Image: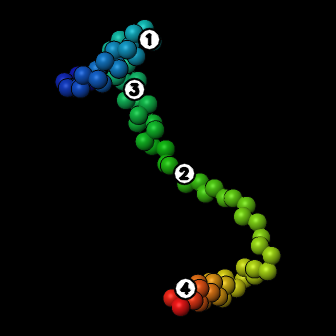
Amino acid sequence: MRTTLTLDEDVAAQLKAIARQRGISFKEAVNSVLRTGFARERRPNRFRQRTHRMGLRGGVDLDRALRLAATLDDEETVRKLELRK
């Protein structure tokens, strides 16, 4: 298919460089780059969750996280009140 395409100067320069490096025509370089871009867009981006060992703290029961959070919050409140004296 024949069409007219207006390219930015930097894009045209990169395509010309690719054509020179590969020893292909400008048209072949454009088609090759477009095909590569389309192939990348079709692949879904996979989410990968990275995990890290955090270790266990002595005396901390992870099953009672809300109780722990409340205790820590209470301790911080007491510390702040003591600073006001």
Q: Secondary structure at mark 3?
A: helix
In this rendered view, identify the residue nearer to me: 49 or 65.
65
Say how the picture is coloured: rainbow
Q: Secondary structure at mark 2?
A: loop
- Spatial distance from mark 1 to mark 2, Cα to Cα? 33 Å
- As drawn, the residue found furthest toward the front would be 85
Question: Mark 4 or mark 2, which is nearer the start of the sequence?
Answer: 2
- Looking at the rendering, which quadrant does residue 68 occupy? bottom right
Q: Which residue is mark 4?
A: 83
Picture residue at 63% right of the left edge, 55% below the top: 50
Q: Position of residue 4 (x, y in %)?
A: 19, 24
- Spatial distance from mark 1 to mark 4, Cα to Cα? 71 Å
Q: Which residue is mark 1?
A: 21
Question: Mark 4 or mark 1, which is nearer the start of the sequence?
Answer: 1
Q: Which residue is mark 3?
A: 33
- Spatial distance from mark 2 to mark 4, Cα to Cα? 50 Å
In this rendered view, identify the residue nearer to me: 76 or 38.
76
**What mark, if any, has residue 38 been given in the picture?**
none
Q: What amino acid is labelled 1 in the image?
A: Gln
- Spatial distance from mark 3 to mark 1, Cα to Cα? 13 Å
Q: What amino acid is labelled 3 in the image?
A: Val
Question: Mark 2 or mark 1, which is nearer the start of the sequence?
Answer: 1
- Spatial distance from mark 2 to mark 3, Cα to Cα? 23 Å
Q: Nearer the viewer, mark 3 or mark 4?
A: 4
Q: Secondary structure at mark 4?
A: helix
Picture residue at 72% right of the left edge, 83% below the top: 63
